[in-house]
Amino acid sequence: MIKHRASQDKFDLTVRVLSCLESDIVYLPYKEHDRITADTQAVTHAAFLSMGTAWKSDGRFPWENPHFVGGIENVKVNVALRIYSNKWHVYAGLAIMNPSARVQIQQYAKSVADLFKLMITENETELIARVKTAGEFVFGKSNAHHQPILLSDSLLDEYSLSKMPKDQSMPNSHLSLLAMVDCWYQLGLNPYEHMVCQTPLFRLWMGITEYLFRTPNLLDGALHAAVHSRENRGTDMEFLTAARGWAECVDLGNMEGYRRRFEGTASFFKDRFAESAVLGNRMIQMIMKKTGGKEKEGEE
């Protein structure tokens, strides 16, 4: 509940009316709400939008790429397609009309760029130090009391558009996830505190990020691939370009540019929307059931 330009009597009346729903009511100032939803919605969407644009620019579907096979990749692919199968203006409004979103999306693009520079210069020591410092800030002792979401590859493997056997998969740098944690760290944001305004998509995003950072061999493998697996660099370069493009579009407040970018990428994936919607719905139902959450209407 946000009291903004309302009398106390009207606000109290609204609280009494809504109390019959027996929902948990959280009181927030509007600026805090905007800051939280910038993270749980706008930046999360920007990450998946950037993935879709990068895959389109790369000229091949991610489920045909051995770097995008496995549980974490299934979340990336299905959520990205879920977003692109919807209407562009929903996401444009959440990003462009929220001043906090602009700041966070810009930082996300900067984090992608900073980490990519360390990757291509093969500065492994600094890359590891930066990523693990950010990981400790988000997933370390200060947040140990938060209940983990507990996603894993084995849990997510069945939700795949790929026909490629998992034993043919290749290492992935997970630049999109590394940059998200770096973004939270650079801005001093604690995403666990933002679960009060979570959506199913944010819970999936948090779940795979948490799984990566709380599985040491998986994180170390991603960092090793980031520096030593040059096969990743073309896709990662496209992701950097896409992230910067979306950030600039939002910063300029360019609704028409947003629409054109969104619809251009959506057209690339449109033939797989129906199949990905089925998998995406099953995936969301699984995580909501597993974590005891309830899916919100208007989740995007």
Image (spheres, rainbow, N blue to C red):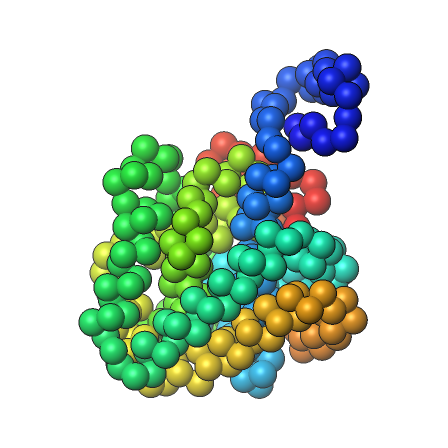
Q: Nearer the viewer, residue 257 or 87?
A: 257
Where residue 175 sits: x, y (%)?
Answer: 40, 69
Where residue 100 sits: x, y (%)?
Answer: 59, 52
Which quadrant is the N terminus positioned in? top right
Q: State the image quarter where residue 14 is shown.
A: top right
Q: Is residue 144 left or right of residue 81?
A: left
Q: State the image quarter where residue 54 is shown.
A: bottom right
> Where 290 sits versus 82, above or below?
above
Q: Nearer the viewer, residue 172 or 249?
A: 249
Q: Residue at x 39, y 76 (%)?
A: 116
Q: Is residue 252 left or right of residue 288?
A: right
Q: How many discs mark residues in the rendered view?
A: 0
Where residue 71 sits: x, y (%)?
Answer: 42, 59
> Where 171 sits versus 76, above or below?
below
Q: Residue at x 77, y 21 (%)?
A: 7
Where residue 121 sits: x, y (%)?
Answer: 30, 84
Q: Residue at x 53, y 79 (%)?
A: 241
Q: Is residue 241 visible?
A: yes
Q: Is residue 161 visible?
A: no
> Where 31 sits versus 278, above or below?
above
Q: Residue at x 40, y 83 (%)?
A: 233
